[in-house]
Image (cartoon, grey):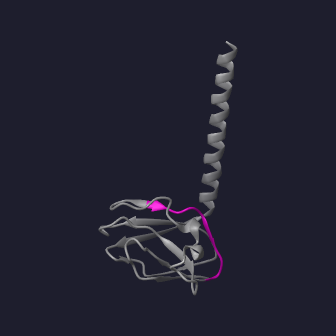
């Protein structure tokens, strides 16, 4: 009986922890705006983006790009080929298969210029301006 009570307490406690984590993620994502970007073969369909300073989640869609796609965001002027310069929170949480959409983590953007591109789909670099 004691073991059953301990097991129930553990399950109940784990459930509360999961609910608290889900609630925290929801709160963080509720404050962040979604920026939807679509990739086709060799390009993004949105070739320039303007945003206000704040928190964002990037939703990247693969519309017949012919390869899995990703997303890289770098401050303008930084060497985009150097992963140390990438804003890693902007990476999608997993590569985006054809016909799918994946999201990044929450990214806080300050005023300035950034470039975004996909090295998997070999897109050009596009400008993202934050005012």
- Residue 9 located within the stretch drawn in magenta: no
Quadrant of image for the C terminus: bottom right
Query: On the picture, is 40 further left or further right than 59?
Result: left
Indicate whether residue 109 is drawn in magenta: yes
In the rendered view, tell whether residue 113 sits above or below residue 26: below
Q: Is residue 29 left or right of residue 101?
A: right
The magenta segment is 102-112
Name the foreground residue: 42 vs 50. Answer: 42
Give residue 110's position: percent from left, percent from top: 66, 77
Looking at the picture, tell me which residue is in the foreground, 91 or 22: 91
Quarter of the figure with the N terminus: top right
Q: Residue at x 47, y 70 (%)?
A: 71
Percent x, y for residue 113? Answer: 58, 84
Q: Taking 5 as reference, is 93 left or right?
A: left
Q: Residue furthest top?
A: 1
Residue at 33% over, 72% down: 40
């Amino acid at each position: 009986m004691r073991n059953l009570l301990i097991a129930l307490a553990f399950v109940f406690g784990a459930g509360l922890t999961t609910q608290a984590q889900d609630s925290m993620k929801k709160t963080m994502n509720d404050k962040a705006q979604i920026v939807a970007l679509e990739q086709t073969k060799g390009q993004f369909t949105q070739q320039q983006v303007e945003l206000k300073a704040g928190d964002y989640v990037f939703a990247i869609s693969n519309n017949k790009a012919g390869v899995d796609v990703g997303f890289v965001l770098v401050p303008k002027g930084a060497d985009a080929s150097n992963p140390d310069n990438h804003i890693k929170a902007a990476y999608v949480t997993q590569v985006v298969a054809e016909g799918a959409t994946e999201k990044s983590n929450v990214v806080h953007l300050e005023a300035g210029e950034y470039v975004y591109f996909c090295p998997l789909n070999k897109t050009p670099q596009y400008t993202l301006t934050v005012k």
